[in-house]
């Protein structure tokens, strides 16, 4: 019995060390490697935040055809972990086609956002892509609209009830007001340009107000500002890590597609700019 306990402690210690190396992955690094190339090598994807889908010229068949193509492309990628550059490009193109057909003008405010969402494909790093240390599992996004909470949950091997390893990132959310979030890794010169752009934007809004015309985009219609709170990792039911995030550790989640059939697309980034967003394609559990 003593030797069994000793072996368990050794195993637990080794696994904990491996997991601790991955906790910062919940906060995506500035440069993320994707199968041998850098995220900077990808073309930025520009998303029209307030685009209204043209329901007259589209049909359920169009949407279903695109979804089938996406599902066919992602099934060999292990939820994005093994996707090649060509696959990522093709999948992103298909998802963009789907985004233009979003049936809602304000997806972030729809009750369909509620519930558990399985991450079928993502360009995000571990553990958001279902990998933690040497283990592969399933990543979920759990949304409670009443409590305004948002949870990233990774379970290994997959079912939460049968997991031996679980990682839970808890957060709160609110509607995004369009103010770009600060990224400490961005140089002062770049930040200065951002501030200049913001001044120009404010000047334009002021002029519009003077003309009694409100041209300010309604960012909250499909964007949340998500504030990370705590990260908890459990192994065989034992808590091996509990971490609290600094105040202001926030991200912008852009809900670019949502429907009643249980499909959702999110572009999640550090600042709110389209070029630093990572793609999440999800289906409701």
Image: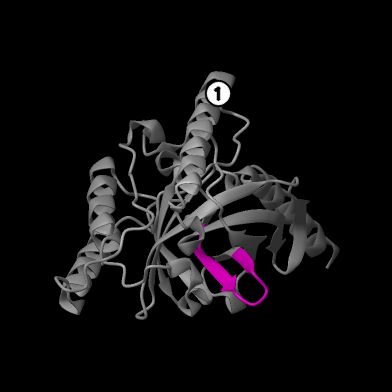
Is residue 199 placed above or below 143 in the rendered structure?
above
Q: Is residue 143 magenta?
A: yes
Residue 31 seen in the figure: no
Quarter where residue 12 is shown: bottom right
Q: Say which residue appears at 64% left-offset and 69% top-offset.
A: 148
Q: In which quadrant is the N terminus drawn? A: bottom right
Q: Is residue 10 magenta?
A: no
Is residue 7 placed above or below 183 in the rendered structure?
below
SS type, badge 1: helix
Magenta residues (range):
136-151
Query: What secondary structure predominates along the stretch shown in magenta?
Result: strand
Is 169 displayed left or right of 205 in the figure? right
Task: Read off the residue under disc 1.
Answer: 192
User: x, y (%) of residue 251?
Assistant: 57, 49
User: x, y (%) of residue 117?
Assistant: 48, 71
User: x, y (%) of residue 205?
Assistant: 49, 43
């Amino acid at each position: 019995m003593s030797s069994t306990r000793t072996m368990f402690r050794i195993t637990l210690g080794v696994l904990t060390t491996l997991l601790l190396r991955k906790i910062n992955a919940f906060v995506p690094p500035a440069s993320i490697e994707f199968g041998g190339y850098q995220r900077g090598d990808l073309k930025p994807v520009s998303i029209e935040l307030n685009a209204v889908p043209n329901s007259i010229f589209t049909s359920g068949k169009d949407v279903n055809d695109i979804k089938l193509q996406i599902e066919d492309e992602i099934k060999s990628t292990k939820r994005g972990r093994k996707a090649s550059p060509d696959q990522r490009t093709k999948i992103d193109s298909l998802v963009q086609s789907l985004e233009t057909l979003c049936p809602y003008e304000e997806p972030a405010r729809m009750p369909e956002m509620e519930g558990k969402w399985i991450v079928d494909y993502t360009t995000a790093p571990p553990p958001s892509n279902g990998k933690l240390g040497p283990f592969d599992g399933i990543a979920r996004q759990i949304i409670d609209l009443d409590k305004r909470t948002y949870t990233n949950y990774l379970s290994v091997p997959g079912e939460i009830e049968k997991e031996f390893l679980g990682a839970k990132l808890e957060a709160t959310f609110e509607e995004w007001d369009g103010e770009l979030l600060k990224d400490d890794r961005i140089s002062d010169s770049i930040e200065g340009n951002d501030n200049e752009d913001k001044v120009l934007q404010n000047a334009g809004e002021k002029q519009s107000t003077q003309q009694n015309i409100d041209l300010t985009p309604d960012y909250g219609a499909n964007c949340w500002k998500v504030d990370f709170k705590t990260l908890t990792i459990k192994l065989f039911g034992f808590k091996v890590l509990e971490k609290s995030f600094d105040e202001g550790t926030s991200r912008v989640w852009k809900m670019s597609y949502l429907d009643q059939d249980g499909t959702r697309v999110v572009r999640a980034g550090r600042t709110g700019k389209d070029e630093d967003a990572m793609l999440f394609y999800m289906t409701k559990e």
